[in-house]
Image (tube, rainbow, N blue to C red):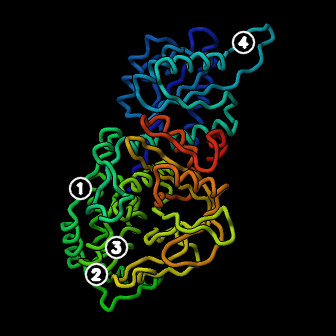
Amino acid sequence: MARGTVKLGFCPIGKLVFSHEDAMRYKAILEGKLREWQIDYADIDGAVEDGIVRSADQVGRVVEHLKAQNIDGVFMPHCNFGTEDAVGLIGRDLGVPVLLWGPRDGPPLADGTRLRDTLCGLLASSKVLHKLDVPFTYIENCEVEDTKFEAGLKNFVRVMSVVKGFHKMRIGQIGQRIDFFWTTICNESELLQRFGIEIEPLDIAEVIGAAKSRAQNERARYRDELEQLRKTVAIEGFDDPAPMLNILGLRDEMLALADEHELSALAVKTFMSLPDELGALADFALSQVSEAGIPAACECDVHGAISCVMLRRASLDAEPTILADFTVRHPEDDNAVLLWHCDFPLALRREGEPARIGTHWILHDIPSGSCHWLLREGDITVARFDGDGGEYRLAAGSGVTVGGPPTQNTYVWMKVNDWPRWERQLMEGPYIHHTGGIYGRYAPALMEACKYIPGLTFEPLGTEPAALREEFFTTF
């Protein structure tokens, strides 16, 4: 159910002066890199001569051509100088993220002439983009083989993915907010008006009925699946398999609803209607839905679901997401914290660690069905989209898993650079204890993506923007 595919518009920029032959040489080199790095792109060969912009009168044809290709961002490499008015107008009229770069200029030829003045052209184009209020991403003027270029281009693809996913986001909401969870109150109308984020209400009674029907109609298949699951996961607290069959039915109903309504994620009221009616906690169903590529946020946390969608889009659908609590500080490491909840994807379980579906560790008088396993090692990016009073922020940062004392439910300990600083930011900002999480390092791409989302301010956790900007061009 991967939905993170994006297409890059490849729009080389030249100039009527300087060497057209050298510009065409770099155009060919860059197309070779796009193919090598398996970046889906649309060129402008069918719109202008030689597939390279050299004058402003070509703008209309280029914009029309690229819009027809449904591009999600445009790369305008300056291949010999730069047609600054064309760059500005193309960027403005396309209305997608813009990437600027040009190859580092070589020394003058023996007679003192130069084949290109790329750096000079880039400076002119950037000024016009500023004049037209067009945000853009810039990669340092460097060689094609420089790591900065590869990292910058690949991370720009992640930026495109986040921006595309954000502006086309649909969150399916199953049930209402839990009455005493004031932290998950959100403004549905404002999300729609400010960002175009749609909340699709899904009747919880209908979902429960459909899940039970699936469990009954697919009983034999679900029984076989449950037996296979028991080979790797201990299932406790059920005298009868019927509740777990209901949970498998709930999983498939949520996936079907996501497909039917083209949902980016789900926000689910996980207690008490679902466990009361299905006979089991819904944690494993949410775990499976997230694992299938549709972030499923517990406790009807709409902002948490949005956070997870942005993280998954930044990863280009490489990993499932988690919605975790910042729970307790590490007893021995002042810069580590526990990421914990009840429904992290089973695919993220640490190899060799036991897995169990059983009773909740603290809520003893409710049905069984809570997930228990330790997550794998690696880098983790966490992010929280949130806001109050019309001001919205995205806080994000990265850490690495570390060892720590075992606990119950699904969890992992994460070490960051300066947890006291993170803690102050989270406390003083419009955030809650919930955070989206994903394996990998995507905070730089999220920061850059916010440049293209009006009304959303990025807040780097525990570091300065300059440090994330440097990582954008070195890590991919």
Residue 204 pos. (x, y %): 22, 65
For marks 3 and 1, the one nearer the N-term is 1
Camera-nearest residue between 77 and 448: 448
Q: Distance between the residues labelled 4 and 2?
A: 76 Å
Q: Residue at x 65, y 16 (%)?
A: 120
* Label 2 Cα neighbours within 10 Å, binned few <14 / some 14-19 / many ≥20: many
What secondary structure is found at the residue carrying circle 3? loop
Compared with 437, 218 (above or below) is below
Q: How far apart are marks 2 and 1 (CA)?
A: 24 Å
Q: Which of marks 4 and 2 is in front?
A: 2
Q: What label does residue 423 carry, if any?
A: none
Q: Distance between the residues labelled 3 and 4?
A: 67 Å
Compared with 11, 239 (above or below) is below
Instruction: Give the residue pinned by disc 4.
Output: 114
Q: What label does residue 201 carry, if any?
A: 1
Residue type marked 2: Gly
Residue type marked 1: Pro
Q: Residue at x 18, y 66 (%)?
A: 206
Instruction: Give the residue pinned by disc 3.
Output: 282
Residue 437 pos. (x, y %): 51, 58
Quarter of the rendering occupied by the N terminus: bottom left
Residue at the extreme bottom:
239
